[in-house]
């Protein structure tokens, strides 16, 4: 099965409203009939404005997080319906920074995945091990735990185009990326787990992105691996030329 590639940009807590709209426009204008999906995830404050700027373009829009309730007394949170109304079609869930700084867990990632699917959003679920866990040869155990927790209770026909992103925590924002072989091995393990947990159709059809210090210079080597279906890009997505360079490398 041929899986369509995706390059997604996670802007994290960067860019003002005006800067976000400008960057989104530069990305949209720079695409040259790319045969892949391109997505950007601005801050919640810029989501609607960026959505308006990208209307009619090839670029998809994602939120960086959602809460699992549709509405209520949850100060500071945004829900799937709010994100959909702002123009987003996707949402990033379980990023390591959310786990590290805000106490998110396999359980809360699962609640968010379920809320995204119920709200008509495509979840981009992030999983990955720390440096200490890799050095102790715990990578596969960590990935299995994160996947099992976040996808608990779901059947194959519930997944709604779920996208996974393997992001080794030791490679995020450090300038150190996993080797092409390391990335491919982790993705192969994730795909085998999907086959075991769901079925071969899910395993073969689910896109698994790589994230962790992806740049134009290393993108081709990483993204041309058999099990790597694209990239979730952090810092390099904040510059249109760099982000477009990664897209062109696919």
Image (cartoon, grey):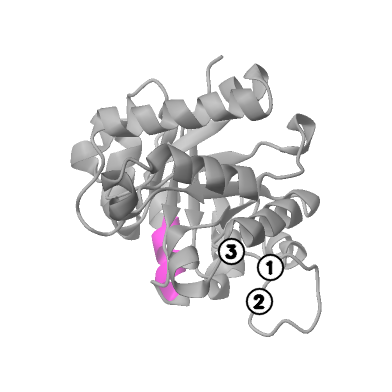
Residue 157 — which label? none
Can you name the residue that lies furthest to the front here?
A: 136
The residues bearing labels 2 and 3 have C-alpha atoms spaced at a distance of: 9 Å
Q: Is residue 226 visible?
A: yes
User: In the displayed structure, would residue 200 be above or below residue 90?
Assistant: above
Of helix, strand and loop, which one carries label 2?
loop
Looking at marks 2 and 1 on the same chain, the residue that comes earlier in the sequence is marked by: 1
Which residue sits at x=66%, y=76%? 77
Contact (Cβ within 8 Å) of mark 2 with mark 1: yes
Residue 12 lies in quadrant: bottom left
38 left or right, relative to 196: left
Q: Looking at the picture, how far across and down is residue 73, in whole percent?
A: 78, 84
User: How packed is label 2: few (under 14 Cα within 10 Å), some, or many (20 or more)?
Assistant: some
Question: Is 58 or 70 nearer to us in this picture?
Answer: 70
**149 or 5, which is in the foreground?**
149
Dot 1 crowding, Cα within 10 Å, few <14, some 14–19, many 20+: many
- Image: magenta residue range: 18-25
Q: Secondary structure at mark 1?
A: loop
Residue 231 place in picture, x, y as percent: 40, 41
Give whichever of 78, 135 is nearer the camera.
135
Q: Quadrant of residue 97?
A: bottom left
The C terminus, quarter of image? top left
Bin the neighbour count of mark 3 within 10 Å (Cα to Cα): few under 14, some 14-19, many 20 and up: many
Which residue is tagged 3? 65
In the image, farthest residue toward the top: 1
**Residue 21 falls inside the magenta stretch:** yes
In this rendering, does residue 4 appear at all?
no
Task: Tell me if label 3 and label 1 are in contact, CB under 8 Å.
Answer: yes
Label drawn at residue 67: 1
Residue that badge 2 annotates: 77
């Amino acid at each position: 099965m041929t899986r369509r590639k995706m390059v997604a940009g996670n802007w994290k807590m960067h860019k003002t409203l005006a800067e976000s709209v400008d960057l989104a426009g530069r990305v949209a204008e720079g695409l040259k009939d790319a045969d892949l999906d391109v997505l950007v995830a601005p801050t919640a404050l810029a989501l609607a404005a960026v959505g308006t700027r990208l209307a009619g373009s090839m670029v998809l829009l994602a939120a960086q997080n959602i809460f699992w309730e549709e509405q209520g007394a949850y100060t500071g949170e945004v829900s799937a319906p709010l994100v959909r109304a702002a123009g987003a079609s996707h949402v990033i869930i379980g990023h390591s920074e959310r786990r590290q700084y805000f106490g998110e867990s396999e359980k809360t990632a699962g609640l968010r995945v379920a809320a995204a699917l119920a709200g008509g959003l495509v979840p981009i679920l992030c999983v990955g091990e720390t440096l200490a866990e890799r050095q102790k040869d715990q990578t596969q155990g960590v990935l299995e735990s994160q996947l099992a927790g976040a996808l608990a209770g779901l059947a194959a026909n519930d997944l709604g185009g779920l996208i996974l992103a393997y992001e080794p925590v030791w490679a995020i924002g450090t300038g150190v990326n996993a080797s092409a072989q390391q990335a491919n091995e982790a993705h192969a393990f994730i795909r085998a787990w999907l086959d075991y947990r769901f079925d071969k159709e899910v395993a073969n059809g689910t896109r698994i992105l790589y994230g962790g210090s992806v740049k134009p210079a290393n993108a081709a080597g990483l993204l041309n691996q058999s099990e790597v279906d694209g990239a979730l890009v952090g810092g390099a997505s904040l510059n249109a030329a760099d982000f477009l360079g990664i897209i062109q490398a696919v």
